[in-house]
Image (spheres, rainbow, N blue to C red):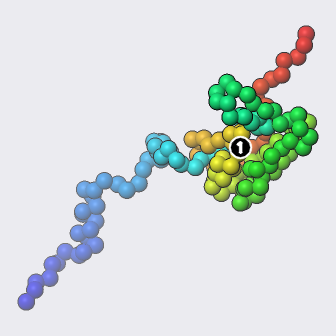
């Protein structure tokens, strides 16, 4: 005859969990280490858009397609499965605008951009109460020099 234990199985389990390492992390206070291939927020550099390396290596020839009428390639818009990218006019030029509220972070735009204008970043905290903050508007960081 098998003798049954008088200690409840739930109590045994609770006691064993006292001595085990917690499964959760201290996220807001300790930032996690992300894998190298993590898909975080995409970053758009306006200076790289519409400039194609002809294939002569670094410091070689580049072709500026802005001189061609209707020059936007729109590959990022075409390849985005969530329709999160649209072309808007900024400073007289047509540029992509990324809506992160629609984005599914597949990074198809990063992979398909022939000019390398859309890149991945390590910024992953996108929580906000303002929906307009989730729209990455294209703007130039380089100030054009004005003649004096």
Q: Which image quadrant is residue 51 in?
A: top right
Residue ID at (79%, 37%): 50
Residue 6 visible from this viewpoint: yes
* 123 to the left or right of 88: left
Q: Nearer the viewer, residue 32 or 81?
A: 81
Where does residue 91 sit, x and y in percent of width and height? 89, 34
The N terminus appears in which quarter of the rendering?
bottom left
Residue ID at (48%, 46%): 35
Q: Nearer the viewer, residue 28 or 97?
A: 97
Total numbered labels: 1
Residue ID at (63%, 55%): 106
Circle 1 sits on which residue? 114
The C terminus appears in which quarter of the rendering?
top right
Where does residue 127 sit, x and y in percent of width and height? 63, 49
Q: Which image quadrant is residue 7 in?
A: bottom left
Identify the residue at the far front of this view: 56
Identify the residue at the far left of this view: 1
Where does residue 43 sit, x and y in percent of width and height? 67, 40
Crowding at dot 1, Cα within 10 Å, few <14 / some 14-19 / many 20+, comes out as: some
Residue 133 visible from this viewpoint: no
Kindly state the secondary structure of the residue where label 1 is placed: loop
* 7 to the left or right of 133: left
* 68 to the left or right of 82: right
* 1 to the left or right of 77: left
Identify the residue at the far top of this view: 148
Residue ID at (86%, 45%): 88
Q: Which image quadrant is residue 94 in?
A: top right
Where does residue 141 sit, x and y in percent of width and height? 76, 29
Q: Nearer the viewer, residue 21 or 58?
A: 58
């Amino acid at each position: 005859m098998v003798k049954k234990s008088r200690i409840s199985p739930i109590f045994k389990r609770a006691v064993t969990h006292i001595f085990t390492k917690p499964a959760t992390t201290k996220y807001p206070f300790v930032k996690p280490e992300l894998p190298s291939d993590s898909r975080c927020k995409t970053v758009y550099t306006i200076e790289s858009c519409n400039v194609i390396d002809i294939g002569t290596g670094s410091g070689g020839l580049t072709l500026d397609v802005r001189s061609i009428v209707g020059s936007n390639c729109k590959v990022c818009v075409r390849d985005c499965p969530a329709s999160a990218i649209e072309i808007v006019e900024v400073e007289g030029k047509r540029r992509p605008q990324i809506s992160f509220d629609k984005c599914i972070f597949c990074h198809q735009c990063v992979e398909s951009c022939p000019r390398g204008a859309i890149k991945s970043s390590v910024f992953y905290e996108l929580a906000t109460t303002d929906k307009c903050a989730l729209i990455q508007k294209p703007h130039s960081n380089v100030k054009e020099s004005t003649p004096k």
